[in-house]
Amino acid sequence: MPEAASAPATRATIGDSEFDRDTAVTRRAPGVYDIDLSAGWTITNALNGGYLLAVLGRALGDALAHPDPFTISAHYLTASRPGPAVVRTETVRAGRTLSTGQASLFQYDDQGNEVERIRVLASYGDLDALPDDVRTSAKPPAIPPMDQCFGPQDAPAPADGLSAIAGRLKLGLDPATLGWALGRPSGKGEMRAWFGLADGRDADPLSVLLAVDALPPTAFELGLKGWVPTVELTVHVRCRPAPGPLRVSLTTRNLAGGFLEEDAEVWDSADRLVAQSRQLARVRLG
């Protein structure tokens, strides 16, 4: 059992936390939802892709007959920005154990034209109805205890364009994957960390959609700098997380043509693999 991270004095609960408020959607009409995207989840000026995926995931959870995302794939078409947005959903198929739907997030550009930012296709089910039989060769990542790891608060000085999202997360980055922060990237394309929300809210399937995209990109350990925008992100949620901190492991094996893949595993406090993901991201070379 992993050592738990220290919790805030007053813990937020699922349904009553900053994450829940900032991903809440308001149903305007069947399948149509309004939201004011929060600037609190930006990296410099860009909204985090995992936060945006959780917004769309929440809308689909309301629109579909089943509550939990099992698999959700998003294509990021244009850059989203804080402010008003609308999510339009459509049920593709409603089955007995799985419902499939699609959703798109739209905003208006400076000329008043509606622009599609993200398009998602997802299948939802009931995680609590899954059988307990698990057969796996996967193993949790070896990460030092939280008090031996480092977060944004340990940086010697605030970085330019400090990410607002850093104040909403409790990250403990494995020192073995922090060479980039010292000017000595390992070249291995790995990132590992403890993950939690700063207000102490436990993880659920929606916050797992955030967790897979919340760590510094593996491109940093490959010696690259700058924004690494997501082109496509697919997440598989395997079970409902147990209370307590999550462990997230990212790996990249191949960078070619200015794009890399990033594979994530998310493990809970009961040593269960609760989610897996793969994304394709663009990197700035030179």
Image: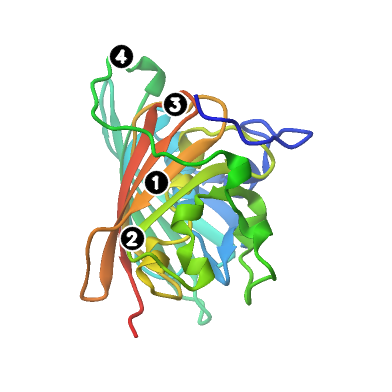
Q: Nearer the viewer, mark 3 or mark 1?
A: 1
Task: Assign a secondary structure to mark 1.
Answer: strand
Residue 136 percent across, percent down from the top left: 24, 26
Q: Residue at x 45, y 54 (%)?
A: 176
* Amino acid type shown at disc 4: Pro
Task: Assign a secondary structure to mark 3.
Answer: loop
Q: Residues within 10 Å of mark 3 (few under 14, many from 20)?
A: many
For disc 1, the marked residue is 249
Taking depth in this image into account, of 102 and 253 the one nearest to the observer is 253
Q: Quadrant of the C terminus?
A: bottom left
* Amino acid type shown at disc 3: Arg
Q: Earlier in the sequence, mark 1 or mark 2?
A: 2
For disc 2, the marked residue is 189
* Amino acid type shown at disc 1: Ser
Please determine whether, in this image, residue 72 is positioned above or below residue 183: above
For disc 4, the marked residue is 131
Do we see residue 26 in this rendering?
Answer: yes
Q: Are marks 2 and 3 in contact (CB under 8 Å)?
A: no
Please determine whether, in this image, residue 5 is positioned above or below residue 127: below
Q: Residues within 10 Å of mark 1 (few under 14, many from 20)?
A: many
Task: Assign a secondary structure to mark 2.
Answer: loop
For disc 3, the marked residue is 240
Residue 2 percent across, percent down from the top left: 51, 29
Q: Nearer the viewer, mark 1 or mark 4?
A: 1
Q: Are marks 1 and 2 in contact (CB under 8 Å)?
A: no
Residue 92 percent across, percent down from the top left: 26, 40
Q: Give the Cα distance between marks 1 and 4.
A: 25 Å
Residue 148 percent across, percent down from the top left: 59, 45
